[in-house]
Amino acid sequence: MELISGEIKLRSFKESDIPRLVELANNENIARNLRDGFPHPYTPEHADAFIKRCSELDPQTFFAIEFKGEYVGNIGLVKGNDVYRKSAEVGYFIGEEYWNKGIATIALNLICDYGFNNLDYIRIHTGVYEHNIASQRVLEKCGFVKEGVFKMAVFKKEMYWNEVRFAKLKYL
Ligand SMILES: CC(C)(COP(=O)(O)OP(=O)(O)OC[C@H]1O[C@@H](n2cnc3c(N)ncnc32)[C@H](O)[C@@H]1OP(=O)(O)O)[C@@H](O)C(=O)NCCC(=O)NCCS
């Protein structure tokens, strides 16, 4: 499965992505903006297990992001449970050397179109730590609406952080 817009492609992970995934993901500037489930340090074993889990998902919901033919990051949707099953949470990262080239914005637009049109979701949402201005900007550029601030909802690196919740609906 491939989703393409200009120089950006979302595709399945390959075993050959592992070394580059480790290089890009093993970065404190990325890990500090994600959940603790995103390991730091990030090892080849973590990458291998992650790629295996992604390849078992049916339908496919996690993608490698390519920019000009190079692997540069990850994006994925996690389906909600029970009464939240028509919603998905989106998560993503771009390797630091590729930041501010508009890559996340295009990747997020691609996966939203896929989630709404191919997976029957009507709502895609995420939570961003308040200090993460770049991700909030990406979400706004993609038409996500800020729904509220969950005060001190996040405990990360022995500190409490406010979380800003964003969502985009299929039907407005
Ligand atoms: C957030 C992240 C995915 C953005 O990826 P990206 O490819 O650089 O995003 P884009 O280039 O599409 O857009 C970034 C926007 O943020 C803006 N931006 C970046 N840093 C900023 C800052 N410190 N203050 C204000 N705006 C900032 C850029 O100018 C750009 O906006 P613009 O197009 O209006 O100029 C990337 O920084 C990342 O992987 N961060 C770590 C992981 C993470 O935060 N994941 C999301 C968790 S919710």
Image: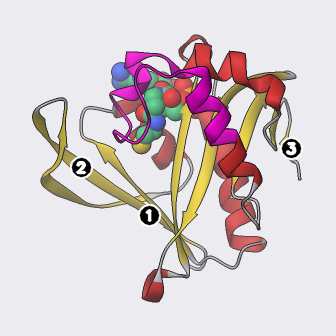
Residue 145 lies, with reference to residue 130, above or below; the image says below
Q: Position of residue 38 (x, y in %)?
A: 44, 36
Q: Position of residue 85 (x, y in %)?
A: 53, 82
The residue sitting at 86% across, 35% down in the picture is 6
**Quadrant in the rendering for residue 166:** bottom left
The answer to whether residue 67 is visible is no
Q: Secondary structure at mark 2?
A: strand
Kind of residue sitting beneath label 3: Ile
Q: Residue furthest bottom?
A: 83
Q: Earlier in the sequence, mark 3 or mark 2?
A: 3
Q: Position of residue 128 (x, y in %)?
A: 34, 45
Q: Residue furthest front?
A: 45
Mark 3 and mark 1: Cα distance apart in space: 23 Å
User: On the rendered structure, is 38 left or right of 60?
Assistant: left
Magenta part of the chain: 25-51
The front one of 50 and 72 is 50
User: On the rendered structure, is 67 left or right of 61?
Assistant: right
Residue under label 3, please give it: 4
Residue under label 1, please give it: 167
Residue 163's label in the rendered image is: 2
